[in-house]
Amino acid sequence: MELDKWLNQEELFTESEYSTEELISDQLAWYEEQTRVGHYGLVLEAMPALNMVDKERYKQLQTTYDLLVDYYLKGSVDPDRASILTEIGREIMRILRAADHKIKLDKEPFGVRYDTLTRLEQSFGDGLDKIPDTIGLLLRSNEEESGYFDHLEELFDLVWTKVELTEDDSLALQALMTNGGHQLATQAIVGALFVGAMEFFDLRKLRLLLMTLEESPHERTIGAALVALLMLGRRHQDELEALHSDFIGQVTNHLLQRSMDTDERQLLLAIRTIYTAYQTTSLHQLFKERVLPELANLSQRMQQLLNSGTGDLAQRMQELSHEESEEMYEISGLMESTQRDFQNIISQDSDVAFHMTAQMKVHPFFNKVSHWFLPYSKHHPSVDRDAATSLEELIPVLFQGHVPCSSDLYSFAVLDSFGMIRQQIQQQLDGMPLPEPAVSNKSSLEQGMRDFAFGAYRFYTLSMLAGELVNPFEDEPMVMDGPFTRDQLLFAEDDLEELVGFLKQIRFYLHTEGLYLRLYRFYDHSSADLWRSLSATRLILKDDELALELLLRAVEVEGITPITAKKIGELKIDLEGVESVLEWIERCEASLPSQDQLELVQQRALLLYEQQEYEPALSAVHKALYLGEGAEVSETGATMLLMAKILLHLMRPEEAKRQLDHFAEKYGALEGDLSLVSGVIRMAMGQSTQEAVRQMRQTIKEGRVREDVESLISLLSIYDFAPWELALLTDLVYAEDTE
């Protein structure tokens, strides 16, 4: 079966979302692609056409390749041949990256990389190999000393702008990253390694992040490094798989060891944190497009109410009439419910502070890349000490009980007007004590994950500096499919189930498919929920045939259920035709208890009506009304509308009128589509056309009509209404009242 073939497909993991254009310049794309698949000879043969290639490096590489080929053709046995070939591929990629860097600088001479390199050259001269010296200065000072942050920010820029670190750079950075006294600096440099490696693959940067996981004494730095490494793995997935399988193994082994050494599910936490950052995009859009406009509208209503009288605000509040007080109470309730609805949409861990501080990132403080990744410190020279003290007290008020990330703390701490903000808050509190500071229930490691991920998200989505840089949040990459997270032993069965539940909660449905397939392949899962969920992702991807097969597999596991039965029926309409659907519905009706049949019977009635099988459709409608006794008015009304249309087709308008009158007695006056069809019935019975038109016109004016008016009026054709009369009636119904 097609389904079994798909379920057991060889490729369980998806391709990287990063395009070739993001990986390397257009003129180098062919060279990069051929290198990844191992066609080194073709690449070396064509490489002289690239004028920007280091000729000496190229010559040495060509000689090595020629010797290897010569020995191979002569039949010589060399156990190191595979590793030598891999090293040739790696060296070709280094040459291509150097050329790519030159192309991009020439193409964008005014971007953040160019500007930063220019400034560094002015500070250090032509030779930029100053990383070890700068680290030495940093290690001999601390964050309370003058110049410390200058050294740290220079080091950040030296690291991220360097296409490939040297061995000396790596050794110096390793000394810093394992130092027990510089947590702030080590977490910041994780950001530098991340930004740099996001632009250009550099194995030394990736190795430093792995070393940080293995040897750093700082939990927050470890958390940041784990998130960075997972995101970079997805970014450079193709090159890692082609040329660095040994490094993938090292990272995987470390993650396996880490999972055995701690009860905290750190890898799962890191992945959840990355997806929480992804979710910020949709939440912010919801906040801007729905929550803020609604709150602004309600606020305007309240202002209009308060400004309609005389005197000051306190006097006006006392003068409100009973009706005005009721309206004020209603507006206040709506404002609270709007905010509460938004809070219900977001998860407990969502990045809610983003909505409050996004507009504050235009402050000059954020004109440096490093400042977006700096852990918060009240000793930073841009932070006023008094403001820092006040900020610590006001965090519970400003961030509504959430623990903010460093970037957002700096947003307030560097404001010249923070004293004014403090006074306003204190006036609003009117002597009330400040809330207690929020105590995070998250470990230092998870706090480091969130601080890094949320800070990086702000940089790449808000900063003008990041405009020409590769944005790791743009396409919400599936980090679970990256090269470091594929080993079956990394995730227990309940880990995968928890992650699936989390992704469904934050509406990342497509990202669950691979996890469900892992549950099926690794743990032999075959639950109805698994089949239904896989069907849902296939539907999103417009793969209706496979979606139908998956739903039928769910039926095999748990039997027929109302929801599954209805969805299968909808899919069968397009794939197999109406007859197949009707057979399916009849089978389901026979299997389900009467209380679960309503939607299926309604579906059958509609299909029969569309097939112009009016008598069977009417029987189905009667059954639906019987089953729906006590159902919502809207649901019963939809069935009644279908009955009225069927009876009109059967030329039984009097019966249709009796049914509608009975409905009106039970549920109240006819509204919307029922009122509309009632007007058509009156004309079919030969009653006053004028009254019928007036009724239909008023119904349309009230704006609660879903039916196509012209289609309803066309039903009168079987009652000997001429085409010109049908057209005239349509005009009259839609026309302004001329009576």
Image (spheres, helix red, strand yellow):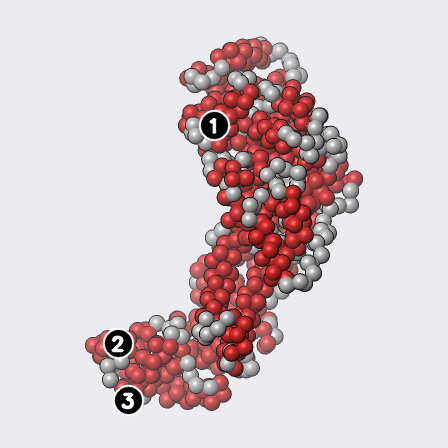
Tag 2 secondary structure? loop
The amino acid pointed to by label 2 is: Ala
Gap between marks 3 and 1, in whole Å?
81 Å
Q: Is 516 on the left-hand or right-hand side of 101?
A: right
The answer to whether residue 206 shows anywhere in this view is no
Upstream in sequence: badge 3 or badge 1:
1
Q: Mark 1 points at which residue?
A: 114
Q: Mark 2 points at which residue?
A: 735
Looking at the picture, how far across and down is residue 263, in whole percent? 78, 45
Looking at the picture, how far across and down is residue 482, in whole percent? 60, 38
Upstream in sequence: badge 2 or badge 1:
1
Q: Are the residues flagged by discs 3 and 1 in contact, CB closer than 8 Å? A: no
Looking at the picture, how far across and down is residue 548, in whole percent? 52, 57
The amino acid pointed to by label 1 is: Tyr
Q: Is 638 on the left-hand or right-hand side of 505?
A: left
Tag 3 secondary structure? loop
Gap between marks 2 and 1, in whole Å?
65 Å
Q: Name the mark nearer the viewer: 2 or 1.
A: 1
In the rendered image of this protein, does residue 628 appear above or below residue 199? below
Residue at x-position 65% and y-position 50%:
390
